Image: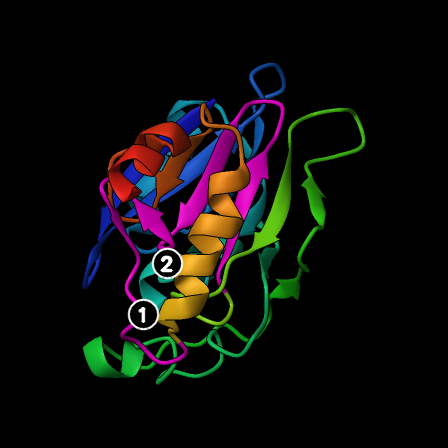
Amino acid sequence: MVFMIPVQGYFSENCYIYADDKTKHGFLIDPGAEPEKILDCIEKNGITIKKILLTHGHFDHFGAVHALCKALSVPVFAYSDEYLCDPKLNLSRFCTNDMVIDYAEWFDDGDIITLSETGEISLKVIYTPGHTEDSVIFYDEKAHIAFVGDTIFKGSIGTDQYPGGNKMQLYNSIENIIFLLPDETVLFSGHSEKTTIGIEKKRYS
C-alpha cells in the first residue's frame, strides 16, 4: 500500500509511506515537513515504520527527519552525506535556517532495501544523478512502483539548476535508466501527481 502525504514547508512536497499490505510494516520516504501530519497518517493507518529513505539530500525532502527519527526510533538512509551535511548544497541556507542530517546510514546503487527477512516488500536503489549528485530512485520490480524524487514528474522533468545539477546526467538518468523500466511502472515523485513510465515516454518523445 502507498500513502501520499502532501506536506508544506518552505516548498510543498510529497512524502510517501510504502507498507506491506499484510504486516503493515513499511518505509517512510522523503519526509520533508510537517512531522505531526506524517505521524498522524502513520498512527491512523496502523503502520509500523522500519526505515526512513531519502531520494536525495535537498532540505525540502528531509526537513521532518529529526522529529520523525526521534518519535519512531528508526534509522534514516541516503546515498551520501555530501548534501545532507552542507546547508549550501541542500539549499536550506538560502531558504530557511541551516539544516543538517549528520547521522544517516548509507545505501549504494543496486542495493536491495528490505523491511525484514520475512519476504515483505523490498526496494532496489537505482542511482539517477542529474537533479543532484546524490539522487536515487527506489524501485519495486514486483509491484511495478518507483519512488523517483525530483528526477522526473508528471509531465516534466527535474531541474538541473541547483548545485550539483547536470543536464546531461539528468537526461541520461531518464532516458537510459528510468525509461528502461516497464511501461506500466507507476512513478511517485516529490512534487507532482503519480504517472507511469509509458505515459511519460509519450510526452518526452
The amino acid on which the numbered mark 1 sits, given as a three-letter code, is Asp
Query: What residue occupies the far front of the structure in this picture?
Result: 205
Identify the residue under disc 2: 61
Q: Is residue 55 left or right of residue 193?
A: right
Magenta residue span: 135-164
Instruction: Specify whether residue 8 is in view.
Output: yes
x, y (%) of residue 8?
20, 52
Judge the density around disc 2: few (<14), some (14-19), many (≥20) Cα neighbours within 10 Å. Answer: many
Q: Give the spatial CA distance, label 1 vs label 2.
A: 16 Å
Give the residue type at disc 2. Answer: His
Q: Is residue 72 above or below residue 43?
A: below
Asked which quadrant contains residue 200, the reply is top left
Please tell me whether residue 190 is drawn above or below residue 140 in the rendered image.
below
Upstream in sequence: badge 1 or badge 2: 2
Of residue 22 and residue 183, the one placed in the foreground of this image is 183
Answer left or right for 187 relative to 193: right
* Residue at image point 40% right, 33% down: 197
Q: x, y (%) of residue 78?
A: 57, 61
Query: Which residue shows up at 35% across the image and 67% down it?
Result: 59
Label ID, residue 55: none
In this rendering, is residue 164 above or below 74? Answer: below
Q: Which residue is mark 1?
A: 160
